[in-house]
Image (cartoon, rainbow, N blue to C red):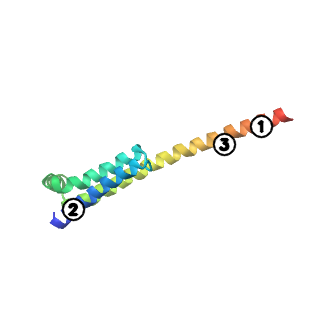
Amino acid sequence: MSPKLQIASLIIGVAFFFYIFYVIRKKTLSPTYSILWILLALFFVSVPVFESFYVFISRSIFGFYAENMIYITVIGFLLIYVLFLTLKVVKLNDQVKELISFTAILESKLKDKID
């Protein structure tokens, strides 16, 4: 890998890492979501450190250059994150439907008591 890519990966990883901890301390991001982002930051930091390992894995197992493995890993991370968010949205949607029906039942009972 080129030294520019290694330096960029290290800078992005460290900046991500500090930003995630900053956001957690401000309680803007829940720890559940932050785990995924911390893993991505650790991956970026690990690229220059374990370069020979990534080169070995990418060439021997997958048959392509290590730079492409970085792109594939980041895209894979984003797909996992989108799936995670989709599952949360579906769960929240179900909870909203349940709350709406519960509120309608309470409203009808309240109207019956008033009449």
Give the x, y percent position of residue 111. 81, 37
What residue is drawn where x is 62% and y is 43%?
97
Q: Image quarter for residue 12? A: bottom left
What residue is drawn where x is 60% and y is 44%?
96
Determine the secondary structure under disc 3. Answer: helix
Q: Is residue 72 visible?
A: no
Dot placed on the residue nearer the N-terminal end, 3 or 2: 2
Picture quarter with the C terminus: top right
Residue furthest front as drawn: 26
Amino acid type of the residue tagged 2 in the rendering: Glu
Horizontal arrangement in the rendering, residue 101 relative to residue 61 (left or right): right
Mark 2 lies on residue: 67
Q: Report how far apart the C-alphas of labels 3 and 2 lie in the structure.
A: 50 Å
Determine the secondary structure under disc 1. Answer: helix
Question: Depth check: 97 or 28 in front?
Answer: 28
Mark 1 lies on residue: 108
Q: Report how far apart the C-alphas of labels 2 and 1 lie in the structure.
A: 62 Å
Mark 3 lies on residue: 100
Q: Is residue 5 visible?
A: yes
What residue is drawn where x is 66% and y is 42%?
100
Picture quarter with the N terminus: bottom left
Dot placed on the residue nearer the N-terminal end, 2 or 1: 2
Amino acid type of the residue tagged 3 in the rendering: Ile
Q: Residues within 10 Å of mark 2 (few under 14, many from 20)?
A: some
Asked if the residue at tag 1 contacts the one at tag 2, i.e. Cβ–Cβ closer than 8 Å, the answer is no
Asked if the residue at tag 2 contacts the one at tag 3, i.e. Cβ–Cβ closer than 8 Å, the answer is no
Asked if 11 appears above or below 92 in the picture, the reply is below
Asked if 42 appears above or below 5 in the picture, the reply is above
Question: Depth check: 38 or 27 in front?
Answer: 27
Asked if the residue at tag 3 contacts the one at tag 1, i.e. Cβ–Cβ closer than 8 Å, the answer is no
